[in-house]
Image: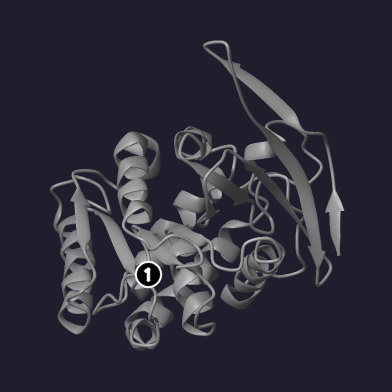
Amino acid sequence: MVVMTGSLENTQAGGEQRPGRQHFSIEHGGVTVSMSRGGRGRTVVLCPGLYSTQAGLQVLVELLRRDHHVVSFDLRGHGLSSAAPRYSFAGFLGDLSAVMGAVRLSDPAPVLVGYSLGADLAVHYVSERPGSVAGLVLIDGANPIPEPFLSAADLPEFRAIWETSAAPDEGDARDAADRVLLTAQQVLDLNLELDVIRTGPLLGRYLDIDAPISMIMSTAMAGDDTGEPTRWRNRNWRDGTERLCRERPDIPVTWLEADHRLVLTHAPEIARIVADHVGRLPAPGD
């Protein structure tokens, strides 16, 4: 069931009337997913990652809307979407599937852009649905790393990091559009699940995708600390991408001198790369 919420917004830029932005939601499996759409041109769906929201990605969204009709949304437990009884990769994949089902009612083959966890969700979605997208852009995610990022020795450190940023509770209205309702333990469990996926079946998923793929990766995913743990994580990240390129040499990879926050620090560059990818695709109906 699709429920329309809010109104159509129109904006002025230099005296020019721009296409309005529409806010609505989708209810599926007991979860309400908040969505918005706006801009004109080829339809681009932006799938966020863990701990990212529409509000947090707003600069990138607005840049993309200059050239495209962009659909953005919040995963369960993020931003303006509702909480869920539990959080898992399958649950987040269900959110993306529901969004794509709604989008494809009017555009059967949009371009799908995924960031971080959202890239992994995008690869899984497209690998199971041939012909469902015109193209795929993956931003610093969906990386078939050779070794897990988190070892048993890392767990206390990362649990402490996520405990400092966990939201207090769902009823806190402050910064609701950018809140995250997951606990530190839930975030940790998801990262462990993602490690299993990336070191295991993910690479094979790429072999089932026939849509054009472009990748945008950070050179310092884990940061620029000179300590050996950070250097190892960054090497592992690059090794995973190189592993993919050996299996799929047709996938172009753009490396940005950035850490995992590249969607915030390098939004203009990312928007240009997405526009280049979209520009190389056949026109709808061709």
Asked if residue 156 shows in the view, the reply is yes
Pointer 1 residue: 142
Horizontally, is 46 left or right of 253 in the view? Answer: right
Q: Quadrant of the C terminus?
A: bottom left
Mark 1 residue type: Ala
Horizontally, is 196 left or right of 56 in the view? Answer: left
Asked if residue 260 shows in the view, the reply is no
Figure check: 214 above or below 239: above
Figure check: 206 above or below 167: below
Horizontally, is 4 left or right of 196 in the view? Answer: right
Q: Image quadrant of residue 266? A: top left
| Along the line of sight, the residue nearer the viewer: 84 or 257 | 257
* Residue plotted at (69% across, 25% down): 10
Q: Image quadrant of residue 158? A: bottom left
Residue placed farthest to the front in the image?
286
Figure check: 35 above or below 193: above
* Residue plotted at (50% across, 56% down): 49
Horizontally, is 114 left or right of 83 in the view? Answer: left
* Residue plotted at (19% across, 53% down): 255
x, y percent for residue 182: 64, 56
* Residue plotted at (17% across, 76% down): 249
